[in-house]
Amino acid sequence: MSTAQDDNTHPPLPAGALFVVTLSLALAVFMNVLDVSIANVSIPAIAGNLGVSTSQGTWVITSFAVANAIAVPVSGWMAKRVGEVKLFVWCTVLFTLFSFLCGLSGSFVMLLVMRAAQGVVAGPMIPLSQSLLLANYPPDKRGFANGIWGMTAVVGPVAGPILGGWITDNISWSWIFYINVPVGAFAAAGTWLVLRNRETETQRLPIDLVGLALLIVGVGALQVMLDKGNDEAWFQSTFIVVLAITATVFLAFFVVWELTDDNPVVDLKLFGRRNFTVATLCVTLGFMTYFAGVVLLPLWLQNEQGYTPTWAGITTASLGLMGAIFSPIVGRLTDKIDLRFIVTFGMLLFAGLSFLKADANTQINFERLFLTRLPWGIGLACFFIPLITLSLTGLPASKVASASGLFNFMRLIALSFGTSLSVTMWDRRQAYHDHVLSAHTSVTDPLTQQWLAQAQAQGMSEQQSYGALARVISEQSFMLGLNEMYYLAGVIFIGLTVLIWLSRPNE
């Protein structure tokens, strides 16, 4: 099964050169996706060191996410003007430089500017790394190439919080950025040395200024709204309402403009291809649902179970272990097996694991949590890697960068939606269960009286026993809300197994 139609005349790379370029591109992707999440656990340390509040400190995450989300979908257009190899190498060099400057930042404003700059140059790195990898692998090995690429994309977000927490606790928050310097230098040098004579064709395309302006404002407003919505109580905030209206209006005009412009900055006509549309819908809904679980479990462990950030990260990271092992294997299988069977298996595995997790209780231990998360990595590899391959099936190589940029843009937006919606829904379900449980624990109820009497018999005062009961109710409410979120995830994954069969991988 070919991922893209061949329109590249370069001879195959020798095995040694192919290894170097694969390692270079994979490290660049890992460094890139790692930076999306590595700063999350370091926000309190960064905010304290630079003299701002923790809520202000979260703009370190938002500034990167907004700039990155804007830059990803225009990667294909930029690559046609500059050349894929040059653009990738320049972005990697600049990403490395801005990472170093982030670490050197002596003020919060400088850090925000450097993080935004990081996000801009990080955008093209993801789709271009995939495009360059596929262009230099033989057609019968492109599924394996997607597996290698997907492995780094899967492991990075999981490893980020653990690595970020350890570095911040044991060295300094600046080093979460400094570690990019040797990695980026190797990735840029390795890619340039091997691929400098294999540059793609360039075109002097006119700049779609209107489309670019609509994209920047629309996506910027949407990303800030998603990042800040829960903190600002969503539409009770005028700030969030203005962002929502701005995003809706500008993105609506953006879609109309791009579909009618002769040289669009984002090729939305790719959605006219059945396989690309189905793959993008599946990865958007699938990643939104999957990432909700990735976000909620560590929050619950830290806030309700007393886990430290590092141990909460380790518990969640078990899915990355199997994801790293199975991604290349699944990638190889996509060259031989109908993609729809692999995706269906992955979705059903996710559904089964979600239903299993929906029966958890507050006494669950670390070992069970860690071990039950392991198979999630298999499910992630089985649905993510084939969908990458499916999204590019039948495309000429000249459109791979554009398609990959749009595909990954939707994945990034899905992560933001998944994070924001899941936290909001969990909070509301917790409030509902807290209300219901509290209504059933009246002081006139015999069981409640018995519980309070036992608490007071253990040395608590009457006031302390009431406080302990309220804490128990809160803990159970959060647990019930989390179980419901996992049950909903299972239902969604089952639904996605139907959607994938609308595709035609052999077309």
Image (tube, helix red, strand yellow):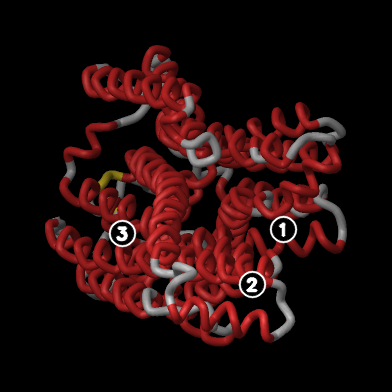
Along the line of sight, the residue nearer the viewer: 372 or 192: 372
Q: CA distance from mark 3 to mark 2?
A: 53 Å
Say if mark 3 contacts mark 2, CB within 8 Å.
no
- Which quadrant of the figure has residue 271? top left
In percent of the image, x 41 and y 29: which residue is there?
Answer: 77
Q: Is residue 226 above or below residue 181?
A: above
- Which quadrant of the figure has residue 200? top left
Q: Earlier in the sequence, mark 1 or mark 3?
A: 1
- Label 3: state its secondary structure: helix
Which quadrant does the C terminus fall into?
bottom left
Q: Is residue 469 visible?
A: yes
Amino acid type, label 1: Gly
Amino acid type, label 3: Leu
In percent of the image, x 61 and y 85: which residue is there?
Answer: 454
Q: Which mark is residue 465?
A: 2
Q: Which residue is mark 1?
A: 164
In percent of the image, x 47 and y 34: which residue is there?
Answer: 223
In percent of the image, x 41 and y 45: which residue is there?
Answer: 417
Q: CA distance from mark 1 to mark 3?
A: 29 Å
Q: For the residue carrying disc 1, how many other residues have a C-alpha within 10 Å: few (<14), some (14-19), or many (20+)?
A: many
In the displayed structure, does residue 506 sit left or right of residue 80?
left
Q: Earlier in the sequence, mark 1 or mark 2?
A: 1
Amino acid type, label 2: Ser
Residue 59, how many percent across, how many down? 64, 35
In the displayed structure, does residue 272 sit left or right of residue 490?
left
Q: Which residue is mark 3?
A: 387
Q: Is residue 500 above or below residue 353?
A: above
Residue 442, how many percent across, how many down? 45, 67
- Label 2: state its secondary structure: helix
Along the line of sight, the residue nearer the viewer: 193 or 67: 67
Along the line of sight, the residue nearer the viewer: 54 or 196: 54
